[in-house]
């Protein structure tokens, strides 16, 4: 059920993010884009980035994802069936991952690649296939003059030794179809200690960063036979003196404050997607972009270069302020469930007689059952035909009625009554489907009374219930009947002990036979009439006891249904609250309280317009009992559909994120209260939240290093009140560029902070890992395929 809830919330959040029908735009990328993942570890980013781009980019179908790995699917989250076609994976079999005790693993991996022509042949074929595929997506892009190639690798992945080879091969092949290829590198760093291997992994990371320092030198050159023709001929790929990558981004799972991101390294995947959008966005409104300070890659790049020509690295941080749709969806579902539960549990004003009628236990229904079970007392008249012993009436007069019966019939009368009345009634009772009769009565009552559900039925059948409980009423009736049976038995005993001559008959002188017949008729009417009444009371008592047992069984069924609803409520509430906890403390405030009120208002509004029972109409939820019988998933699925169609689509969910957040912030405060949050105060908090949560995702030795350069960009509606406020804050005193990437949207705003100009020696990761790197090298470990003498000196 938890997975079902999370899938529902994710679908709603994704649908809201797709923004269709809500007046929000998706972004469009201008030039074709290829994400090139090098190494097994880098493959973990593929599926998340596909999903992120699909949600944000209107033409994301044309984006290509290329993965060079040493083993199929290793380290990579499998792409879903819908996304598999977008991913090209080349597995370089034999380039096994590095083991912790393999002293020259990274170097040997590089040598194995250079020494096996088959690897290059596979890469050439796959990259040319990608180039052809991109050509098929021409209609999705505004221009084919340039291709954006984003290379992604992990610092501690030994396959990053092949970054220059694979990157330049891809660039060379793509340059045959495009006028230019802009190539950026994204280096992902994991600073969490990795058990026993963290030192070795850090040494690998430093070895790559040292090589990367060399790749970004102004005089860096490269030449190798990388291109391979279909006939197996090798063609050199040459890189003239210049930095290999346009820009190098270093992104860690710890920010500049030293704090680990909530989502770890996954947050950096989102940053990469935003940077690519920033650099490669189709400008829908050039005038607006100019007015709001759009991004200029050349200006940014030049600002990172020192006087000596050394190019600085770049890092970034990303924060979001938006309606927390995922948490809202879960919260609304819980409150809708609770609202419907309350409607189902609402106690109607019914008398005990009406409640008894619900179960078919009202006096008329019980009398009807008894009539089916007990032969009619009219059949007692048949007993007058029983043969007598020939005793005379005058002889009977001094006897008791019990003795008179014995003298007349022996045990014949009692045997006849037992066979034709008592035994017949008992047999009918044993065959009588009391449970089925009661359930039919309940089902009929539920159809006729839509305000009756398993909640009321559970309460009415509660074994420890009060006077309002049907079961309590039945048990009270059982006590009454038990007393009545005892009284009837005592009355019968008194009657049988009475004298025969006291039985009133019309006595005729000298007509003994006539008097005897009159006596016999009166005897059966009196004694066996009472026996029949006693039998009826005993039968009714037995019937009620069976009905009480059935009520207890029904109670267990209804109790389980009520518990099922309560258990689902617990899971829904816990899931909603946990999702709220993962949101920013400020952005997630009052979600639970606010949407309890909103959901309740919508439920009441629908009832006012369409009737109190509308929520359980087949066009809405339908029968909750029938859904519960099918299982939790059936109920939750129907409830989710109901919520999406009739609650989440209502007017309160169409407001801008600023309006929603302001109302939510003040939900616990009376509107006239002076403590109510003003819009300007809200904007100040939002702005501070965005800035604090967009901390740069890299740890540096000195926050204010010499060459630090910053640019910050809002992604949102530049005409919205909040963005206008943000663009104006500290406008005259800020020391960084603040711009806005204008997209028509009301669902939220995002902030991307770019910080560049730092160098290898500024990275704490490098400084901490350098000790391991040097120690391993001193102990005979070899990390580089290229000659270490040609690499930059350790700083």
Image (spheres, helix red, strand yellow):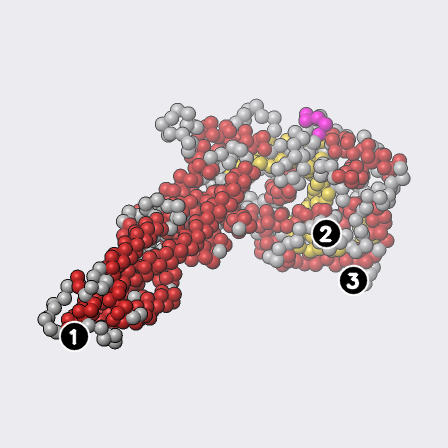
Mark 1 residue crowding within 10 angstroms, few (<14) / some (14–19) / many (20+): some
Q: CA distance from mark 2 to mark 1?
A: 111 Å
Measuring from the top left, give residue 748's x and y in whole percent. 50, 39
Marks 2 and 1, the one that precedes in the sequence: 2
Numbered label attached to residue 74: 2
Does any portion of residue 316 appear in the rendered image?
A: yes
Question: Which of 344/272 is in front?
Answer: 344
Question: Which of 105/563 is in front?
Answer: 563
Numbered label attached to residue 331: none
Marks 3 and 2, the one that precedes in the sequence: 2
Q: Mainly helix, strand or loop, the magenta region? A: loop
Measuring from the top left, give residue 84's x and y in whole percent. 64, 57
Q: CA distance from mark 1 to mark 3?
A: 130 Å
Q: Label 1: which residue?
A: 513
Marks 1 and 3, the one that precedes in the sequence: 3
Please provide the residue range marked out in magenta: 700-705
Q: Could you tell me which residue is drawn at 65 percent across and 39 percent down?
A: 264
Q: CA distance from mark 3 to mark 2?
A: 29 Å
Numbered label attached to residue 230: 3
Q: Could you tell me which residue is drawn at 50 percent across and 54 percent down?
A: 633
């Amino acid at each position: 059920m938890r997975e079902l809830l999370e899938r529902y919330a994710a679908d709603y959040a994704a649908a809201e993010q797709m923004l269709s029908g809500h007046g929000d735009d998706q972004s469009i990328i201008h030039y074709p884009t290829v994400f090139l993942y090098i190494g097994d570890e880098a493959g973990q980013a593929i599926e998340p980035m596909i999903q992120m781009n699909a949600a944000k980019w209107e033409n994301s179908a044309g984006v290509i994802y290329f993965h060079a790995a040493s083993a199929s699917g290793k380290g990579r989250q499998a792409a879903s069936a819908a996304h598999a076609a977008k991913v090209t994976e080349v597995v370089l079999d034999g380039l096994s991952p590095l083991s912790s005790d393999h002293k020259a693993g990274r170097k040997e991996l590089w040598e194995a690649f250079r020494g096996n022509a088959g690897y290059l042949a596979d890469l050439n074929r796959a990259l040319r296939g990608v180039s052809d595929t991109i050509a098929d997506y021409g209609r999705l892009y505004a221009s084919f003059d340039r291709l954006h190639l984003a290379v992604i690798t992990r610092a501690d992945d030994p396959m990053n030794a092949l970054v220059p080879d694979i990157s330049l091969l891809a660039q060379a092949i793509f340059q045959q179809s495009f006028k230019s290829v802009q190539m950026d590198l994204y280096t992902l760093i994991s600073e969490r200690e990795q058990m026993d291997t963290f030192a070795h992994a850090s040494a690998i990371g430093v070895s790559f960063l040292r090589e990367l320092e060399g790749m970004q030198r102004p005089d860096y050159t490269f030449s190798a036979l990388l291109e391979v023709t279909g006939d197996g001929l090798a063609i050199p790929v040459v890189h003239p003196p210049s930095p290999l990558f346009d820009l190098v981004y270093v992104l860690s799972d710890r920010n500049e404050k030293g704090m680990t991101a909530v989502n770890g390294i996954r947050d950096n995947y989102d940053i990469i997607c935003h940077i690519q959008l920033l650099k490669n966005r189709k400008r829908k409104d050039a005038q607006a972009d100019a007015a709001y300070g759009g991004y200029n890659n050349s200006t940014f790049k030049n600002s990172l270069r020192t006087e000596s020509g050394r190019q600085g690295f770049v890092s970034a941080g990303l924060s979001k302020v938006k309606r927390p749709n995922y948490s809202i969806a879960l919260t609304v579902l819980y409150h809708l469930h609770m609202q419907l539960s309350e409607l189902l549990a609402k106690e109607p004003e019914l008398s005990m007689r009406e409640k008894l009628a619900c179960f078919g236990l009202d006096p008329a229904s019980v009398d009807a059952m008894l009539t089916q079970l007990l032969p009619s007392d009219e059949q007692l008249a048949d007993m007058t035909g029983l043969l007598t012993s020939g005793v005379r009436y005058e002889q009977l007069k001094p006897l008791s009625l019990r003795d008179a019966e014995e003298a007349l019939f022996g045990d014949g009368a009692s045997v006849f009554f037992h066979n034709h009345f008592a035994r017949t009634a008992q047999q009918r009772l044993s065959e009588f489907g009391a449970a089925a009769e009661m359930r039919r009565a309940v089902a009929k009552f539920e159809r006729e009374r839509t305000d009756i559900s398993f909640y009321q039925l559970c309460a009415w059948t509660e074994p420890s219930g009060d006077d309002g409980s049907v079961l309590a009423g039945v048990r009270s009736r059982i006590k009454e009947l038990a007393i009545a049976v005892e009284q009837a038995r005592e009355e019968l005993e008194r009657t049988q002990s009475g004298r025969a001559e006291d039985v009133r008959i019309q006595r005729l002188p000298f007509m003994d036979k006539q008097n005897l017949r009159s006596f016999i008729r009166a005897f059966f009417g009196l004694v066996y009439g009472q026996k029949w009444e006693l039998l009826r009371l005993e039968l009714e008592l037995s019937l009620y006891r069976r009905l009480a047992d059935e009520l207890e069984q029904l109670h267990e069924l209804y109790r389980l249904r009520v518990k099922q609803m309560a258990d689902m409520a617990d899971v829904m509430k816990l899931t909603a609250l946990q999702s709220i906890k993962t949101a920013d403390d400020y952005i997630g405030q009052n979600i639970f309280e606010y949407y309890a009120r909103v959901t309740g208002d919508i439920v009441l509004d629908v009832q006012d317009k369409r009737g109190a029972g509308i929520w359980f109409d087949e066009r809405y939820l339908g029968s909750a009992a029938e859904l519960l019988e099918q299982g939790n998933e059936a109920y939750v699925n129907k409830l989710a559909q109901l919520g999406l169609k009739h609650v989440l689509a209502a007017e309160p969910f169409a407001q801008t994120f600023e309006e929603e957040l302001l109302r939510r912030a003040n939900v616990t405060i009376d509107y006239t209260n002076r403590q109510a949050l003003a819009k300007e105060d809200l904007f100040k908090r939002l702005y501070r939240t965005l800035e604090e949560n967009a901390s740069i995702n890299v740890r540096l030795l000195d926050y204010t290093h010499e060459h630090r350069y910053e640019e910050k960009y809002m992604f949102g509606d530049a005409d919205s009140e909040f963005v206008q406020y943000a663009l104006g804050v500290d406008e005259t005193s800020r020391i960084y560029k603040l711009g806005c990437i204008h997209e028509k949207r009301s669902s939220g705003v995002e902030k991307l902070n770019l910080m560049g100009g730092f160098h290898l020696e500024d990275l704490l990761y490098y400084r901490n890992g350098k000790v391991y790197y040097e120690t391993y090298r001193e102990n005979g470990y070899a990390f580089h395929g290229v000659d270490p003498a040609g690499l930059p000196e350790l700083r």
